[in-house]
Image (cartoon, grey):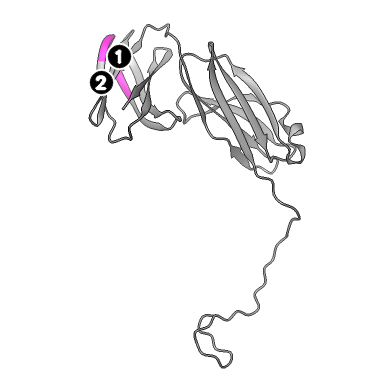
């Protein structure tokens, strides 16, 4: 204990006695786990490519998709992962997500090991351009000081969701609005943000429309 005295030499010493560390040691170096995922907009689809390293045999990999970057659902199980990562080796693959509309989409990969541990890749964000068949649109986005004015055209009255994200997919703002059919304007208290490009997304009436703006 601190200031323990067992022999001559003063009080200001740290004396240890009878300390035992129990456990197991594993020979070798543990593999570093990593998953690289990229998403790129294509014609009416999103092309996805991934590479996983450092996962043991028996690991299951799932491709997840989200429309808001927060709530993800399983889109597909990535076949070949359990065999390809045997011994911690790398495996890679690609696929196309054809079941998407115009707007922002977010993807990540979930790795489930046989011991129950879970590992997630970073989120890959992509904006898919297109024209909404619902007739609604974002006519413009006008930054005004610490707020943003969204100029909208709504096909019909109803509940809509407005959100703002950074270009890397981070959620910065979200609100629900009850809009009337026709042109509409709404002011968003966006606060103080770094100068850069952001994405405004309008969801409702069966469609999602996004528009980039400089703040």
Q: Is residue 188 left or right of residue 52?
A: left
Task: Choose top left, top right, bottom left or bottom right for residue 38.
Answer: top right
Element assignment for label 1: strand
Q: Secondary structure at mark 2?
A: strand
State the separation of the CA atoms marked 2 and 1.
8 Å
Quarter of the N terminus within the rendering: bottom right
102 w.r.t. 87: above or below:
above
Q: Are marks 2 and 1 in contact (CB under 8 Å)?
A: yes
Q: Which residue is mark 1?
A: 152
Report the residue at 35% width, 11% height from top: 137
Quarter in which the C terminus is drawn: top left
Expressed as whole percent of the image width and height from the top left, the position of residue 49 reads 62, 25
Residue at x-position 25% and y-position 28%: 147
Compared to 164, does 135 lie above or below? above
Query: Who's the residue at 41% across and 31% down the image?
Result: 171
What x and y, as percent, mark residue 172?
A: 37, 32
Residue 50: say if magenta.
Answer: no
Residue found at the very far left of the displayed protein: 145
Which of the two residues, 168 or 80, is positioned nearer the viewer here?
A: 168
Residue 126: x %, y % from top left: 49, 23
Residue bearing mark 2: 186
């Amino acid at each position: 204990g601190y200031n323990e005295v067992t022999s001559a030499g003063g009080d200001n010493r740290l004396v240890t006695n009878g300390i035992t560390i129990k456990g197991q040691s594993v020979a070798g170096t543990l593999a570093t786990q990593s998953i690289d995922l990229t998403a790129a907009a294509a014609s009416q689809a999103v092309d996805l490519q991934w590479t996983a390293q450092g996962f043991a045999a028996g690991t299951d990999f799932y491709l997840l998709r989200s429309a808001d970057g927060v709530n993800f659902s399983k889109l597909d199980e990535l076949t070949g992962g359990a065999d390809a990562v045997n011994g911690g080796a790398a495996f890679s693959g690609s696929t196309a997500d054809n079941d998407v509309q115009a707007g922002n989409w977010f993807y990540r990969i979930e790795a489930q090991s046989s011991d129950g541990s879970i590992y997630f890749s970073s989120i890959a964000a992509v904006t898919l351009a297109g024209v909404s068949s619902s007739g609604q649109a974002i006519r413009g986005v006008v930054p005004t000081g610490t707020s943003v004015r969204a100029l909208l055209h709504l096909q019909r009255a109803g509940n809509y969701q407005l959100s703002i994200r950074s270009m890397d997919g981070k959620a910065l703002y979200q609100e629900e609005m009850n809009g009337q059919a026709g042109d509409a304007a709404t002011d968003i208290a966006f606060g103080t943000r770094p100068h850069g490009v952001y994405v405004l997304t309008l969801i409702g009436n069966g469609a999602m429309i996004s528009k980039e703006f400089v703040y």
